Image (cartoon, helix red, strand yellow):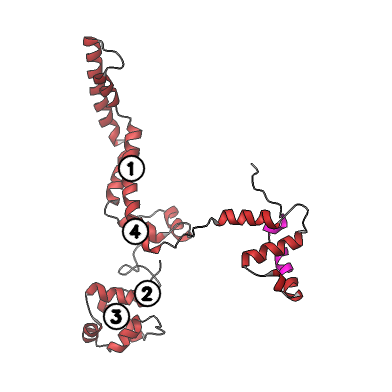
Amino acid sequence: MELSIQERLKDLRVERGLTLEQLAEQTHLSKSALGSYEAEDFKDISHYAIIKLAKFYGVTADYLLGLTGTKNHPNADLADLRLSDDMIELLKSGLVDNSLLCELAVHPDFPRLMADLEIYVNGIAGKQVQSANAIVDTMSATIMKQYNPGLTDPQLRQLVAAHLDEDEFCRYVIQRDINGIALDLREAHKEDFFSVPEDNLLEDFLQMIEETVKEDSDPEQAALVFICKRLKLNLKKLSDEEKKWLKKIAQKSDLLKNPNTQRGRK
């Protein structure tokens, strides 16, 4: 979620542990002006104040104005970031949430995830797993030769269970890393969730089509009824002129060009 100018200014002040009075003393800006910059009905901030506060907080003016989410690295060289052309295009495309991607990358457990992923991708764990499996196989063969236990023998079954599958083990480790990070991010954003309605909107939507659109009904009238129900309008109270315009709107709806319900079809 993008922060407003007011929120950015207040967050920076709170991070420094400063009151408005203390900030005014250190920046030589008036307390009333500083307070107005953080107020919900904030309208304008002078160029002088922007430059003064940006220098004081050690951030860019673009960050204060909400033009970027980067506080301290406005002109980072792409070559230093070692990003591929495909990655740059992805970040510019809007296909992914870049803010969430940043949160993922700066999570304290992200380096561990990358290390485990690198181990799997590069096959580094393969030799270690093979060595461990070789020991288990040798022990299993020795037991079979000396004691010839049945395949249901508990000790033999334990050795069989100890035999590692490299792919399954590495994917389990990677999945565990991702799950932990995902849970933390979800917890951090729990206040952002919109309340979920108790009723099933899709079920209501389909039910409404069945109620208003019948095979032998007038498609035009059905369209009007359908739209009025969705907009919570009383069709009977609409004037002829309003109904006329509503019909024109209904004719532009792709949904109502084929009003017969598809529910239940496979």
Q: Mark 4 near mark 2, Cβ–Cβ under 8 Å?
A: no
Q: Amino acid type of disc 4?
A: Glu
- Counting other residues with Cα less than 10 Å from the Cα at mark 1, is it few (<14), some (14-19), or many (20 or more)? some
Per the model, the C-alpha gap separating discs 1 and 2 is: 38 Å
31 versus 120 height, above or below? below
Tag 3 or tag 2, which sits nearer the N-term?
Answer: 3
Q: Mark 3 near mark 4, Cβ–Cβ under 8 Å?
A: no
2 versus 202 height, above or below? below
Q: Amino acid type of disc 1?
A: Ile
Q: Looking at the figure, which quarter contains the C terminus?
A: top right
Secondary element type, mark 2: helix
Q: Which residue is mark 1?
A: 174
Q: Amino acid type of disc 2?
A: Asp
Q: Range of the magenta residues?
A: 246-258
Secondary element type, mark 1: helix
To which quarter of the image does residue 193 belong? bottom left
Q: Can you give x and y, in whole percent of width and height, for residue 217 in the image? A: 77, 56
Q: Which residue is mark 3?
A: 53
